[in-house]
Image (spheres, rainbow, N blue to C red):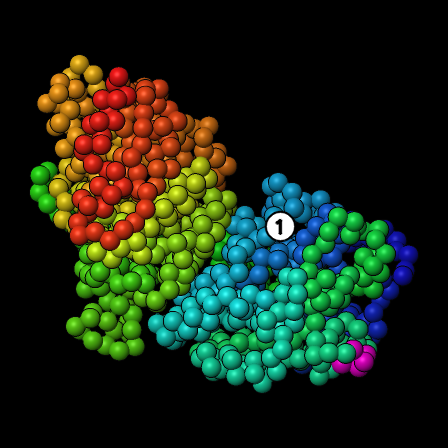
């Protein structure tokens, strides 16, 4: 190691614990940045100087990743270390719209955007800042989030990253969207199936590039694909539709007598390290050009997990208490990877120039995507007392939106026709390679129908995060399989540093309509998911009262940003009970009064849903005959009924602090007894029950069963007028 004068150390290097000697051949290949002023990428991936400086960048990434994680004795350095050459190659080739499927690679990705200056936007200017802010509030989260400058997408649960890459590819033709995929996560079924359907629907959008991080290990053991031969892995990707499979195996360059199929390139001689880095650089360049040129391509880099950091294999995955900057094997790894200040300066200069500037300025998600002007939606206000299908009324508006906005996409796994929204298919057409007018399908359409809720939610939520309008439609009972990525995106939207269209869903065919299908189609407990998320601050579950209400709800949702909006409605013809203006009031206040009957005492019905209103109005009539007054209140947006202190609205980047005040709550729900009624989860009624001071009770979904009618399934769950009346009388004493 070399003693370094502080005068020769670049300012951003403040906090680096170890500096090294100048590497071999620096005089020949390191005298000037290979990306010259005014250029955005290296000119030739076979140029020895380009290879040399890419190798330096890979070592810089490994060093920063390990020092950052060791500074907190926490975090995940090993997985990213095995792909450092490819990440450095992407940057040197001018590609900064990089996505990952692997949340555990977060420290490496932070190192990558630190090197080009992106993190200066959040006050991280030096390596010391980088370490101080890692895994701290308002800093660099343990997994990628929505708030980090220069990083395109969040990363947490496995099997999600490809959705962001594909959404980016769809919205930005001509831009490359690499996405790293871990071999531990390759076992998730969603990755290949979602890519396959996307490629069938959008065969020209090949400008996303999966990069398999094939390092032989998962989080705590060997990966399940670690026993595959190179040919078997190539065959696997080809069998899933990839036309070009480019594999670089570090073993082919091994000269350090490492055993096994997976080896660490940092242990090679310097000449062989150069040879391996050149192979990765050339392969990355070839793969990028193929992907941008219309060929579905995957790049596979096979290198031992933990290459160049403190440990190897699964043991390199995570740091634990005690894995500090003074631990012998941490010190040894850092000193081995340590760069000379002149090398650090060279890496920083290349990174700053690559792609035309820091990712925080040039990545596609760093500015808002221009949206088509929708004009005024053609709302159709039905007369009160009429009977209409709510979902069909919304479908007409969805068709209009798609006709105005060519980027708009509707996703549905179970078929729009089954949900009363075949008018969406008629207006926008299902994307399918076979043209058939009978089924409203053609290659150029805007309705995306993979038979996977994950793929539906994935493309819809990812495109919304990347700036485009979308709608995810699902049966309420099946939506659960797509909710993990929807939750990931809505949380990212809450902290996003730019405005983006809200991610909107339509959930139809609720449990009460699915009697004949039995419990397999009766899973309204999914509403618990949204009920829990309401306190996040930017999640708005909406329950329109009728076909008029759903139109106003969708119109409102389209005008919002950085929110997760779920709309749940029936596909059966039901009575129109509200005007447009009443729903607008309900969106502002959370609920709207539908009917009031005078009496000596007042029973307030707080009702979520449309079909559940039928037994409630029957109960109101029975109470009236007994001289007991009632008020029927339709809860449309329960989030607005919370108290401001219940919800983390002030932590959202686009805060919404509009909650119903105490006087408004008393006006709607003040009475002698409050009865909450819902055909779904009782958790949705929590805001009412928290604030009500009157004796109260709740009638909600319990379990599913096969029945002939909605009335029978409600009766099985105790949701009947008779039960409401009896309970109200008991509470009245």
- Percent position (x, y) of residue 271? 79, 80
What quarter of the picture does the N terminus occupy?
bottom right
Q: Indicate left or right for 398 with 561 as reference.
A: left
Pointer 1 local density, CA inside 10 Å: few below 14, some 14–19, many at least 20 = many
- Percent position (x, y) of residue 39? 61, 68
Q: Which residue is at a point 58% across and 85% down the rendered structure image? A: 231
Q: Is residue 67 depicted above or below 385 in this figure?
A: below
Quadrant assignment, res 723: top left
Q: Which residue is at a point 23% across and 77% down the rendered structure image? A: 435
Is residue 34 visible in the rendered structure shown here?
no
Quadrant assignment, res 33: bottom right
- Of residues 222 and 430, the one nearer the viewer is 222
Q: Which residue is at a point 34% across and 34% down the rendered structure image? A: 685
- Of residues 375 and 722, the one nearer the viewer is 722
Q: Indicate left or right for 1 with 531 as reference.
A: right
Q: Indicate left or right for 164 with 567 as reference.
A: right
Q: Which residue is at a point 86% across and 56% down the rendered structure image? A: 328
- Percent position (x, y) of residue 167? 43, 63
Is residue 412 shown in magenta?
no
Q: Main secondary structure of the magenta part?
A: loop
- Of residues 353 and 277, the one nearer the viewer is 277
What quarter of the picture does the C terminus occupy?
top left
Quadrant assignment, res 616: top left
- Percent position (x, y) of residue 89? 64, 71
The residue that label 1 is drawn on is: 142
Query: SS at mark 1?
Result: loop
Looking at the rendering, the stretch of residues picked out in magenta corresponds to 254-258
């Amino acid at each position: 190691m070399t003693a370094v004068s502080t005068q020769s150390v670049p300012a951003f290097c403040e906090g680096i614990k170890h500096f090294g000697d100048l590497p071999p051949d620096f005089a020949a290949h390191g005298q000037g940045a290979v990306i010259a002023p005014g250029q955005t990428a290296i000119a030739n991936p076979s140029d020895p100087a380009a290879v040399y400086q890419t190798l330096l960048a890979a070592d810089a990434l490994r060093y920063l990743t390990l020092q950052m994680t060791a500074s907190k004795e926490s975090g995940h350095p090993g997985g990213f270390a095995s792909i450092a050459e490819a990440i450095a190659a992407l940057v040197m080739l001018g590609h900064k719209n990089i996505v990952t499927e692997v949340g555990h690679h977060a420290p490496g990705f932070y190192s990558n955007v630190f090197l080009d200056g992106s993190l200066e936007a959040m006050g991280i200017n030096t390596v010391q800042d980088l370490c101080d802010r890692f895994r701290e509030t308002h800093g660099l989260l343990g997994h990628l989030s929505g708030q980090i400058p220069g990083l395109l997408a969040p990363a947490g649960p496995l099997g999600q990253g490809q959705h962001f890459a594909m959404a980016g590819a769809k919205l930005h033709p001509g831009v490359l969207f690499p996405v790293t995929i871990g071999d531990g996560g390759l076992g998730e079924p969603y990755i290949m199936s979602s890519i396959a359907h996307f490629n069938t629907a959008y065969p020209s959008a090949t400008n996303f590039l999966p990069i398999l991080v094939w390092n032989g290990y998962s989080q705590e053991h060997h990966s399940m694909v670690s026993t595959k031969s190179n040919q078997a892995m190539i065959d696997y990707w080809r069998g899933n539709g990839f036309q070009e499979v480019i594999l670089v195996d570090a073993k082919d360059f091994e000269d350090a007598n490492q055993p096994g199929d997976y080896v660490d390139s940092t242990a090679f001689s310097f000449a062989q390290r150069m040879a391996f880095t050149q192979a990765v650089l050339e392969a990355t360049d070839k793969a990028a050009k193929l992907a941008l040129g219309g060929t579905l391509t995957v790049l596979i880099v096979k290198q031992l997990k933990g290459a160049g950091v403190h440990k190897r294999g699964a043991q390199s995955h995570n740091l634990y208490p005690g894995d500090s900057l003074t631990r012998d094997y941490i010190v040894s790894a850092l000193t081995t990877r340590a760069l000379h200040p002149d090398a650090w300066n060279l890496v920083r200069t290349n990174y700053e120039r690559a792609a035309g500037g820091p990712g925080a300025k040039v990545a596609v998600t760093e500015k808002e995507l221009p949206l088509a002007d929708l004009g005024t939606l053609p709302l159709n206000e039905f007369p009160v007392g009429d009977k209409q299908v709510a979902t069909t009324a919304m479908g007409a508006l969805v068709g209009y939106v798609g006709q105005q906005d060519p980027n708009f996409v509707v996703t549905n796994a179970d078929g729009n026709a089954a949900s009363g929204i075949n008018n969406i298919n008629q207006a926008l057409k299902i994307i399918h390679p076979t043209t058939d007018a009978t089924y409203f399908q053609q290659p150029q359409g805007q309705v995306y129908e993979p038979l996977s809720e994950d793929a539906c939610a994935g493309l819809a939520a990812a495109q919304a995060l990347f700036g485009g309008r979308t709608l995810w439609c699902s049966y309420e009972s099946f939506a659960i399989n797509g909710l993990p990525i929807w939750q990931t995106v809505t949380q990212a939207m809450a902290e996003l540093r730019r405005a983006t269209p809200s991610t909107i869903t339509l959930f139809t065919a609720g449990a009460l309509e699915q009697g004949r299908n039995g419990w397999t189609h009766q899973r309204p407990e999914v509403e618990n998911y949204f009920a829990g998320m309401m306190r996040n601050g930017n999640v708005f579950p909406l329950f329109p009262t009728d076909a008029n209400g759903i139109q106003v709800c969708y119109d409102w949702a389209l005008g919002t940003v950085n929110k997760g909006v779920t709309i749940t409605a029936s596909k059966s013809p039901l009575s129109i009970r509200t005007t447009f203006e009443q729903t607008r009031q309900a969106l502002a206040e959370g609920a709207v009064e539908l009917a009031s009957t005078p009496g000596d005492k007042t029973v307030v019905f707080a009702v979520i849903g449309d079909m559940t209103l039928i037994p409630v109005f029957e109960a109101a009539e029975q109470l009236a005959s007994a001289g007991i007054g009632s008020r029927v209140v339709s809860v449309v947006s329960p989030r607005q009924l919370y108290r401001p202190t219940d919800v983390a609205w002030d932590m959202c980047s686009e805060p919404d602090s509009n909650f119903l005040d105490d006087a408004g709550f008393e006006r709607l729900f003040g009475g002698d007894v409050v009865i909450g009624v819902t055909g779904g989860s009782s958790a949705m009624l929590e805001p009412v029950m928290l604030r009500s001071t009157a004796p109260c009770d709740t009638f909600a979904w319990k379990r599913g069963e096969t029945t002939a009618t909605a009335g029978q399934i409600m009766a099985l769950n105790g949701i009947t007028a008779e039960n409401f009346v009896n309970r109200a009388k008991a509470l009245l004493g």
